[in-house]
Amino acid sequence: WNRVSEIRKLSCSENWHHVPGKLNPADLPSRGCSAKQLLESKWWEGPQWLYQDVSIDPQSDLDYNEQEINQERKKKLVTTLINDEQPKMSSSDWHFDYFSHYQKTLRMCAWILRCIYNLRNKDRLKGNLSSEEIERAEIFVLRVVQKESFSNNNDKRLCGMDIYKDKNDLIRLKSRISNRNDCQNFLFPIVLPARHFLVNQLIFQEHLRSCHSGAQGLMSQLRQRYWILGGRRTIKSAISRCVVCRRQNAKPFVVRTPPLPVDRVRDANAFEVTGVDLAGPLYLKTGEKVWVCLFTCAVYRAVHLEICTALSVVSFMQALRRFIARRGRPKTIYSDNGTNFVGTENAFSRVNFEEIAESSGIERIQWRFNPPTAAWWGGFWERLVGVLKQLLRKVLGRSSLDYESLMTVMCDCEAVINSRPLICSDDAKDLVPLTPMMFLRDQVESGVSDCDAVDQKTLSRKVVYRQKLVADLRRRFRNEYLGQLKLWFKGRCNRQVRVGDIVLVGNDKDKRVNWPLGRVVTLLPGKDGNKRLVRVITERGQLLRPVQRLYPLECAVDFTLNEDRTNNDSDISSRSQCENIEVPVFESVIEDDDAKTGVSKSRVPETYKSDIRYVTRSGRKIKTPSKYSEFYRI
């Protein structure tokens, strides 16, 4: 009983008025007074304004701020409920909500039935529950499920089924194998509805007993006793909420393939936009290890190969200097997050390129790194690394060479790769196919140039002619190569990643059981608006990962309670809460390189879990009873 609630229910706020403290007789006993003061006061008659007209309010010297009063007014929350055609759990069965396991529900009903039996009979039952008592409790529970789900035998969901009621008032199905000499439950299974939280508990219990078997195996086991309407769909829906199975069977996010970036399709000089990667190691005759540094032209698909004797920054910088001396200085370099690449970029950042640009006109090289563990972002050089490995397997086999011989083989492989046709044609009348070598060398001319007369007019004409050849070559590249590229999309897009999603952060080096668990905190959209890169918080801090490395865990915590009774109302509310969830952002960020992905425990730390209130508004601590501790486990 609440006095304030009763006043609000029986009265209207428009009829409320303020009584000054000097005129309010109720303040006398609350503030304390003597008996004489009580007799001399207005305690028995009340204040003088009660004898006046109702429309006259008592005078007060206070100035009221209406805005502050309105802010203190209690807000009203308007909620709506989606109607469900399925029958709801009656108010008398509220106790089923306290048990999330089917076996616990049966034991609870068995204890209640024993209590009823002991109250009605003198010979009381004692000790642990027997198997007969648990069986009677299961019959009682199944009878409750059928009464709540099926109004009568003429229910539309039972039309077309040959059913009957047994001696326990359970609806059973007459199967086509009733003449077989077999178990009664197998010949005449119990009919159960598709949407009922007790049916979900039953399915999940059998799923755990069968060591997390799949839908087909679980359906065969349940068929030994029960006939579940829409069985396969219901079983898949129930086991999809299993945390263990979800962790092992989760599939990564899929995003639509974007168009090629501007640096891949614009008109540029050879190696103006370059991708770099290391392949190897290869073993020399002396037993030393060397690596192949592959520079790839992002536009014309040409390659340049260098040999590195170590994975250090110094060795790579020397290979980069040799590349620039032969092929020219690139404007943009793409690479993964190798330590030698990151160290080289850090060394460039310490150079004052503003003074260099003013004196010599040399601009700083723009270095762009791929996200960690996203090797497919550098597919245009990874593909050529595969071509190089195929050539080396066929040429070298299992042989080992010295340094000079290996350099010769690398030059030969470079010439072969750069001479490959970019387009294929089976028509003999077609022009010479385009190759990357055409964009690296000057055009081959007929005649003896040394004997030709060279003057200003002839030289100008030759320059114009060469410019025309370059323009024609780029026009052919545009029409014959770029025009044949299509946007290929393999797979089907699943739901988009959202802030607050609980995901597994996958990698190629560790097993799935060792993948860390994380929560999405930031979405980084691309130029087309699609989210392909996110920041995930784990036990070790924040990680930058592509969405293809994230495996969503869509597990409902209370899957046995309110979902089926409200036609997925709980799912709707959980989705709305997930969209508006506030996730803390931490300053410590861990960025793994391409080859190193951290391994952490497969759980989210307590600090990052959703906000759970452990104290009341008044400050009193909330403690869960020990006997209910198992029911609150996630």
Image (cartoon, rainbow, N blue to C red):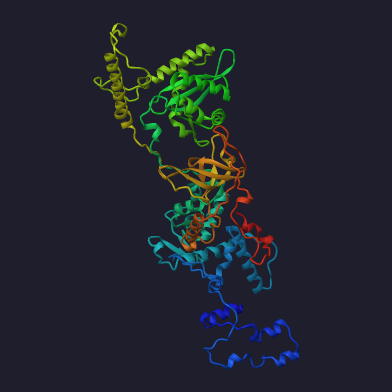
Q: Is residue 385 visible?
A: no
Relative height, residue 520 to residue 95 (above, below): above
Looking at the picture, how far across and down is residue 269, in whole percent? Answer: 38, 25
User: 494 left or right of 343?
Assistant: left
Looking at the picture, how far across and down is residue 311, in whole percent? Answer: 57, 24
- Of residue 44 and residue 102, the one placed in the foreground of this image is 44
Relative height, residue 355 to residue 129 (above, below): above
Q: Is residue 580 visible?
A: yes
Looking at the picture, how far across and down is residue 58, in whole percent? Answer: 58, 86
- Where, by quadrant of the figure, is residue 318 drawn? top right
- Where, by quadrant of the figure, is residue 7 drawn? bottom right
- Of residue 220 and residue 449, the one placed in the foreground of this image is 449
Relative height, residue 296 to residue 497 (above, below): above
- Where, by quadrant of the figure, is residue 457 drawn? top left
At x 34%, y 32%, the residue is 485
User: 481 left or right of 415?
Assistant: left
How many labels sit on residues?
Answer: 0
Quarter of the image with the C terminus is bottom right
Looking at the image, the residue that sits furthest to the left is 429
Quarter of the image with the N terminus is bottom right
- Of residue 237 and residue 613, the one placed in the foreground of this image is 613
Looking at the picture, how far across and down is residue 246, in whole percent? Answer: 53, 47
